[in-house]
Image (tube, rainbow, N blue to C red):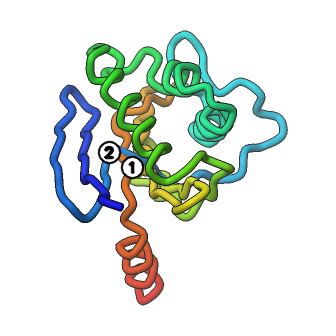
Amino acid sequence: MRVITLLLFLTTTILLAEDKKRMVFSDGTPRPTPSPTTTQSSTKAGITDPASAINKFFESLKADQLEVAYGDLVKNTIISAKPENVQKLKEKTLQAIDTFGPIKGYDVVENLEIGKSLVRTTCLSLNEDLPLRWRFYFYRNGDQWRLVDLRVDDGIVELFEDVARNRKK
């Protein structure tokens, strides 16, 4: 099976690159377990809890609800300002699911905070054939979080190297 490398940077543009070795989009950071008291992950202004937003995203993908997954995640963000970029991301996500199998669940593998306003959560989607690494980047302005970047790839080897490097520190 030929794996296509696609790199999507979701800020104001999405870059696409092809390679014979891996598939890359823009993606995810690890998510802490959502608290039982948090039931609403987004509001009209933004996301109140990145962990709940990520959980809702994966639950929607698991239920084959791609439009709902991305609609809620990118609502009122700079990413949603360019609908053509969101559409490309949806298409590439469908391609990844076709390539690696349906998403059965997800695991949070890392949550990195830079100060109090920037968070990267790295997750693994538990696809039928191969997991994918998702990195979600959130920025907090006031009491609302907004997704500012999303990356997904099949860089499992790199994930092991990152974790091993962080454990040595």
Considering the numbered disc 1 on the image, is that residue within a helix, a strand or a loop?
Answer: strand
- Residue at screen point 36% across, 36% down: 92
**Which label is found at residue 125?**
none
What residue occupies the far top of the structure in this picture? Answer: 44
Q: What residue would you read off at disc 1?
A: 152
> Who comes first in sequence, dot 2 or dot 1?
2
Amino acid at the residue labelled 2: Phe
Residue 91 vertical position relative to residue 136 in the rendered view, above or below: above
Whether residue 1 can be seen here: yes
Q: Which residue in the protein does label 2 denote? A: 25
Which one is in front, 154 or 167? Answer: 154
Assign the C terminus to one quadrant of the image. Answer: bottom left
Whether residue 126 is visible: no
The amino acid beneath tag 1 is Val
Residue at (77, 28) in percent of width and height? 39
Instruction: Give residue 37's position: percent from left, percent from top.
Output: 83, 35
Bin the neighbour count of mark 1 within 10 Å (Cα to Cα): few under 14, some 14-19, many 20 and up.
many
Spatial CA span between label 2 and label 1: 4 Å
Above/below status of 43 relative to 50? above
- Horizontal placement of 148 versus 18: left or right? right
Expressed as whole percent of the image width and height from the top left, the position of residue 105 reads 67, 50
> Along the horizontal axis of the image, is 80 left or right of 75?
left
Percent position of residue 94, x then y: 45, 35
Q: Residue furthest front?
A: 1
Q: Nearer the viewer, residue 121 or 96?
A: 96
Residue sticking out furthest to the bottom: 168
* Secondary element at tag 2: loop
Say which of 125 and 81 sits in front. 125
Q: Quadrant of the N terminus?
A: bottom left
Image coordinates for residue 23, horizontal then vertical, percent: 31, 54
Residue located 71% across and 24% down the image: 40
Q: Are marks 2 and 1 in contact (CB under 8 Å)?
A: yes
